[in-house]
């Protein structure tokens, strides 16, 4: 369990189009090559410590004649942002993916002291 100290809790959220490979015959669309896409996200303001980040697919445009395989996650979560990571494998062909995200965590407070 993550405990949030202090009385200032922030929630930031957004929606990110990770790629549109069908427009450029990209690797996700042709079904070979790198099958992982990394997309940087910056928060609207920095959190006090790295927040908890939830991600989900909000647009799924994928070929239906093959198996539909996908994984999505938040990686390298920092105070000021993170990377959205989408992956697929085998013969799955993905035209485009949009992901929604939400970050919840403690915010800096003017009364915080940094004695380090």
Image (cartoon, rainbow, N blue to C red):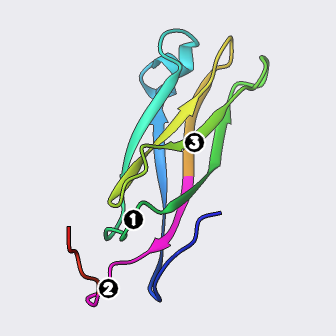
Mark 1 vs mark 2, CA separation in Å: 12 Å
Name which of mark 3 and mark 1 comes first in the sequence: 1
Q: Identify the secondary structure beneath mark 1.
A: loop
| Residue ID at (41%, 40%) | 39
Q: Quadrant of the C terminus?
A: bottom left
Q: Position of residue 84 (x, y in %)?
A: 48, 43
Where residue 90 sits, quadrant-wise, is top right
Q: Write down the residue under mark 2.
A: 109
Crowd band around label 2 with a 10 angstrom C-alpha radius: few (<14), some (14–19), many (20+): few
Query: Is 49 left or right of 87, judged from the image as shown?
Result: left
Q: Position of residue 78 (x, y in %)?
A: 37, 54
Query: Is 113 left or right of 23, judged from the image as shown?
Result: left
Q: Quadrant of the N terminus?
A: bottom right
Mark 3 vs mark 1, CA separation in Å: 19 Å
| Residue ID at (36%, 63%) | 43
Q: Position of residue 86 (x, y in %)?
A: 55, 34
| Residue ID at (63%, 47%) | 59
Name which of mark 2 and mark 3 comes first in the sequence: 3
Q: Is residue 10 above or below residue 61?
A: below
Q: Identify the secondary structure beneath mark 2.
A: loop
Q: Write down the residue under mark 3.
A: 73
User: Is residue 85 located in the magenta-colored stretch of the structure?
Assistant: no
The magenta segment is 100-111
Query: Is 40 left or right of 59, judged from the image as shown?
Result: left
Q: Write down the residue under mark 1.
A: 49
| Residue ID at (42%, 43%) | 76
Mark 2 vs mark 3, CA separation in Å: 29 Å
Residue at the farthest front position: 115
């Amino acid at each position: 369990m993550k405990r949030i100290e202090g009385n200032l809790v922030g929630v930031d959220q957004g929606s990110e189009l990770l790629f549109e490979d069908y427009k450029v015959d990209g690797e996700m669309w042709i079904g070979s090559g790198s099958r992982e896409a990394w997309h940087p996200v910056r928060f609207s303001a920095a959190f006090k410590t790295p927040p908890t980040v939830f991600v989900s697919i909000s647009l799924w445009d994928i070929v239906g004649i093959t198996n539909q395989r996908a994984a999505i996650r938040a990686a390298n979560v920092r105070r000021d942002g993170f990377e959205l990571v989408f992956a697929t494998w085998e013969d799955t062909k993905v035209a485009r993916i949009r992901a929604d995200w939400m970050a919840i965590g403690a915010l800096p407070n003017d009364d915080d002291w940094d004695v380090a």
